[in-house]
Amino acid sequence: MPGTLFDLINITGDALLAGTLQLSLINGFDPVVGQNFQIINADNINGTFDIVLAADLGSGKAFEVIYNPNNVTLLVTGPLKGDLNGDGFVGIDDLNIVLGNWNQSVPPGDPLADPSGDDFVGIEDLNAVLGNWNAGTPPSYNVNIPEPTTGILLIYAIIPLAARTGRYK
């Protein structure tokens, strides 16, 4: 039910979409595959969201954003084809799985590197990954980036060493 179970934005006139759409689930809600949610109504929908950050739906489910002339709807889809590592995003890690198993036979029904299901890792599997490239929600990575001063301190430590080794030539 719009307005009580999920948000719905009604716009009189045209809607120009851009930026980031942040989706989240509340109160343990677990949508089922095939369920849809109309989230924006307008006289005309123009543009698309640049980035869609969706909640982790688990079990390989994902939100697909559908842009219609007068509305935007979220559709809950099943496992992303090409998401071989199951992180909810089709990207470089999935491509590396295909390439790492390239031209090999895999056990029947083994989805690892074989989204085509033909028990062989080849062009069909590569196309499944590339055909859904960047689909889903990118995983967040916790990466420690050194402070800029770390690089400067290293330079100051290396210069005296370089100067010393230069004197003894």
Image (cartoon, helix red, strand yellow):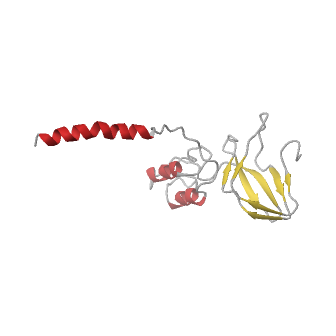
Residue 47 position, x and y percent, is 72, 63
> In the picture provided, is 165 more to the left or to the right than 28?
left
For the point 58% across and 42% down, which residue is it?
140
In the orientation shown, which residue stands out farthest toward the left?
Answer: 169
Residue 73 to residue 44: above or below: above
Residue 84 position, x and y percent, is 56, 47
For the point 79% across and 55% down, which residue is it?
73
Residue 25 to residue 106: above or below: above
> In the picture provided, is 141 more to the left or to the right than 18?
left
Tell me the quarter of the picture where residue 169 sits.
top left
Tell me the quarter of the picture where residue 50 sits.
bottom right
> In the picture provided, is 119 more to the left or to the right than 10?
left
In the orientation shown, which residue stands out farthest toward the top?
Answer: 27
Residue 135 position, x and y percent, is 63, 54
For the point 44% across and 50% down, which residue is it?
100
Which of these two is toward me, 89 or 34?
A: 89
Residue 145 position, x and y percent, is 47, 39
Tell me the quarter of the picture where residue 23 sits.
top right
Which of these two is toward me, 62 or 6?
A: 6
Which of these two is toward me, 68 or 146?
A: 146
Q: Give the tally of numbered discs.
A: 0
Residue 44 to residue 107: above or below: below
